Image (cartoon, rainbow, N blue to C red):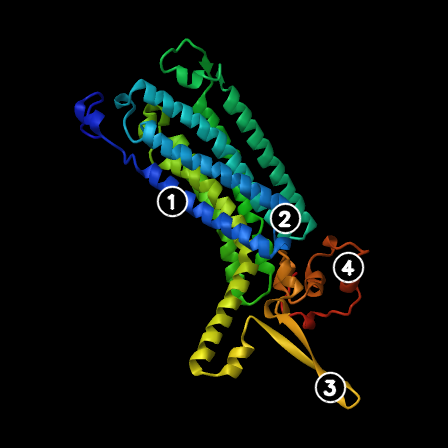
Amino acid sequence: MAGSSAGSPEYLAETNDPGLDQRVSIAFIVIDTFFLLVFYTSRYFNPKAVGLPMLICNTLCYVLCMGSAATGILMVKIGGVGYHVAAVPVTTFQTWLQLSKVLEFTYTPAVMFGKLAALFLYYQVFEVTGYRRVIVSIGVIIILQGIISLILAFSICRPFRYFWTQVVDVNDGTCGDVMLFYKSYSIPSLVTDVAMLVIPWPILVKLRIPLSEKIGLLLTFLAASLGIITCALRFTVFFTVPLFSDPTWYASGGPMIYALVEPSIYMIASILPTTRHLYRRVSRKARQAAQLRSAKIEGSPKNSSGLSQSTELGAVKKSGTSSRVITRHVEIWQANTNSSQEELTMGEWYQNRQEWNQFRPTDTLSPSTPEAEASTSGKITTSQAPYTISA
């Protein structure tokens, strides 16, 4: 823009990468769809790992993210994004304003449901009363923030249509400070992002498991921190960039990308830990298939038959001087699966539930439960548990 005065042919011909929003929108349609399919597949094989609230929140977040992505594409196609507002026809600019309002109604609840999905994951994983109270408190704040933001989005301009009709008739109604609304939304959003980032670390750091598993867990939960990065960038944009001085120009890139990335990050972050069981299942089957191919190449029918996905076990039953074989069909996957693989809690990273119950805080156990009795009976000692949470 340097060297081009407003209204000059050079200025009006300038573009700000108008196709960027469209490319990002298409990319996140693919990314979000992939992770949601993985999420559904994982839940199909392991329904205990994914509660109904998390399923609902992630599904709604996905639908709203698709709405935001479609809005981003339409902004490029018919909204004049990437061009100076002075070069955009009035009707096109009105279309952009209408689509911006649509984006408010998809982005705000998408972030809310994405964060709630992550919080439901935290609530399920961290079986500590104090942590769960904090998680519930953050969830209440997020819900209130989402509701208030939607109410303000509806009521900031009166009549509602004045948000886009003011372009042609400034006397058609009144609008509040839209930029102040965006800034005000960003502050509590950033605070809840920081709180969600901090929640898992005290327990994860104290968790004594093999280093490779701990690193994997830390990286999994660290993925949620990417949401705070996009939130911080969006926060910075609202306070440093005069968005409404040239709306269609500044709309290309930052604001639209942040609106797509932030809710998607929280959805993906809540999905990743639920895929642990699916990953083990796929890895096991891949190893079995590789061993089976290796055995066939070596020409060993004995090894090949022993590595099949299912097998028949024979038991000899004697009756006097005669005997007969009773054949039983056994699925190897079922034989190799234990109950700990069916749960998504911190106890999943222990060899059995009693070990986790012995070392997690006592306020999370009900005195009447068998687990509580086992943890207080003294039958499990520190030396028996390979992994512990330090005091």
Label 1 environment density (alpha carbons within 10 Å; few <14, some 14–19, many ≥20) = few
Label 4 environment density (alpha carbons within 10 Å; few <14, some 14–19, many ≥20) = some
Q: Nearer the viewer, residue 219 or 241?
A: 219
Residue at figure coordinates x 65%, y 62% from the top left: 340
Residue furthest out toward the front = 322
Q: Which element carries disc 4, helix, strand or loop?
A: helix
Sequence-first disc among 3 and 1: 1
- Disc 1 versus disc 2: distance between alpha carbons? 28 Å
Q: Which element carries disc 2, helix, strand or loop?
A: loop
Q: Which element carries disc 1, helix, strand or loop?
A: helix
| Residue 134 in sight here | yes
Residue labelled with disc 4 = 372
Residue at figure coordinates x 60%, y 32% from the top left: 144
Relative placement, left or right, of 26 versus 151 is left
- Disc 3 versus disc 4: distance between alpha carbons? 48 Å
Q: Quadrant of residue 374?
A: bottom right
Relative placement, left or right, of 44 versus 19 is right
Q: Nearer the viewer, residue 322 or 85?
A: 322
Label 2 environment density (alpha carbons within 10 Å; few <14, some 14–19, many ≥20) = some
Sequence-first disc among 1 and 2: 1
Residue furthest out toward the bottom = 321
Q: Which mark, residue 27? A: 1
Residue labelled with disc 3 = 323
- Discs 3/1, front: 3
Three-letter amino acid code at disc 3? Ser
Residue labelled with disc 2 = 51
Q: Which element carries disc 3, helix, strand or loop?
A: strand
- Discs 3/4, front: 3
Residue 280, percent across and down? 54, 64
Q: Nearer the viewer, residue 312 or 55?
A: 312
Three-letter amino acid code at disc 4? Ala
